[in-house]
Image (cartoon, coloured by chain):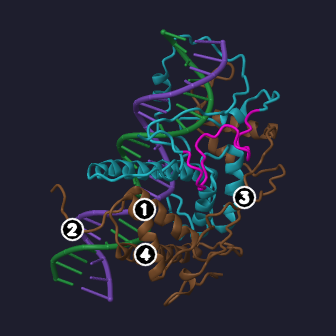
Chain colours: A brown, B cyan, C purple, D green
Amino acid sequence: MPQSPSTRWCPTPEQLMILEEMYRSGVRTPSAQQIQQIAAHLSNYGRIEGKNVFYWFQNHKARERQKLRRRLSRHYQLLCSGHSLPHHQLCCMQDVPAFPHSHHHATPTHSHHLESNGGLNLLEKMEINNAKEAPETNYETFGHEWTSVMMLPNHRSLRTLDLFPTTSTGLKDECATSNSSCSTSIN
Amino acid sequence: MPQSPSTRWCPTPEQLMILEEMYRSGVRTPSAQQIQQIAAHLSNYGRIEGKNVFYWFQNHKARERQKLRRRLSRHYQLLCSGHSLPHHQLCCMQDVPAFPHSHHHATPTHSHHLESNGGLNLLEKMEINNAKEAPETNYETFGHEWTSVMMLPNHRSLRTLDLFPTTSTGLKDECATSNSSCSTSIN
DNA sequence: GCAAATTAATGATTTATTCAAG
DNA sequence: CTTGAATAAATCATTAATTTGC
């Protein structure tokens, strides 16, 4: 039980992270030479061989693809419910390269407090729910409805910020390898 | 009637991908406003509510952290085998295991609330809203209300939150996927 | 091939901590 | 020291994936 000497490679967390990062950066089927380099680098973090690297990429690619397929099939199911489904690149999960790219955070520049109606609406619901008796602003027994706040149609600007990049730049292997049924375009 | 009696939200692949992309971009605990916007945007791809977005980020963050922790512990095991472990990006994907800290939601100073109930135990409060009944479409049971900030009757300046400054003033649990080893002291 | 049974993922709730304000 | 606000951790619960016996 201590050290099965040569059972199978067990990636260290560092190795795993590096491999995943590489995958994320677009690496899919590294060449023999690349594999050797990768293995060499990763061997700093634990025992590893080239074949481990090779297998890892094989497996990871396959499993990501499988995951994608699952999602797609589930998506079809949901389509039956009738969604508009606008255009969007549903393509390969292949995401963003590792280099510093757009960080589009909301940048709300604070302020933006809610308009009064938002709060009113919620208070209404709270009272309905709980039949409040509290003389004033008794926050103890909430009606648990922060949800309703969120659900409020956003009357404000709601400029649907640029939060959504989905810059799939790199799609290489995933969409184009052997069978490449990755295909996008559900609509 | 084939109105799916779906009790719970089932994210479409697009929604999932966008959420994951946001997470990768550093989004961890979006503010209420952000949640609204995200939900609004994602609703283009299927039915979704703000609470789903909220829960998704909560869960995803927690489970990523859990995964990290597992890896770390396994890593310690492997350390016993005697690996050099040079320092590398083993660092924080988000938070580090055991130290939750600092929330930065500013409170809008609701200065005068009841103080009539001096010795109110906070466990009491929890018991109060422990009444779940309607099995479906119940938004009843919810305990915490950070949104209460938003529904305060007094719309004072309410300059709450610079919740999501791109400039990352109070880096809380965001730590994008870049390198820049923020490696806390792990050893 | 197919459903019932089992297992894995993950959405949704509840409980415990943490920190700050009073 | 007490308490409100926020959230992380733990847990519950349901959906999907997989396995299994026919």
Q: Which mark is residue A16?
A: 1
Mark 3 vs mark 2, foreground winner is 2
Label 3: chain letter:
A
- Please give the residue where the numbered disc 4 appears in the rendered image: A36
Residue B1 appears in view: no
Q: How many neighbours does mark 1 have within 10 angstroms: few (below 14), some (14-19), or many (20 or more)?
A: some
Q: Secondary structure beneath disc 4?
A: helix
Q: Secondary structure beneath disc 1?
A: helix
Q: Amino acid at mark 4?
A: Gln
- Please give the residue where the numbered disc 2 appears in the rendered image: A6
**Mark closest to the chain's N terminus, 4 or 2:** 2
Report if the CB atoms under discs 3 and 4 are less than 8 Å apart.
no
**Marks 1, 3 in one chain:** yes
Report if the CB atoms under discs 3 and 2 are less than 8 Å apart.
no
Separation of residues labelled 1 and 4 (CA atoms):
16 Å
Depth check, front residue: A80 or A59:
A59
- Please give the residue where the numbered disc 3 appears in the rendered image: A163
Residue at 46%, 50% in the rendered image: B87
Mark 2 vs mark 1, foreground winner is 2
Q: Amino acid at mark 3?
A: Leu
Label 4: chain letter:
A
Report if the CB atoms under discs 2 and 1 are less than 8 Å apart.
no
Measuring from the top left, give residue C12's x and y in whole percent.
50, 50
Q: How many neighbours does mark 3 have within 10 angstroms: few (below 14), some (14-19), or many (20 or more)?
A: many
Is residue B172 depicted above or below B17 in this figure? above
Is residue B115 depicted above or below B34 in this figure? above
Mark 3 vs mark 4, foreground winner is 4
Residue at 60%, 60% in the rendered image: B19
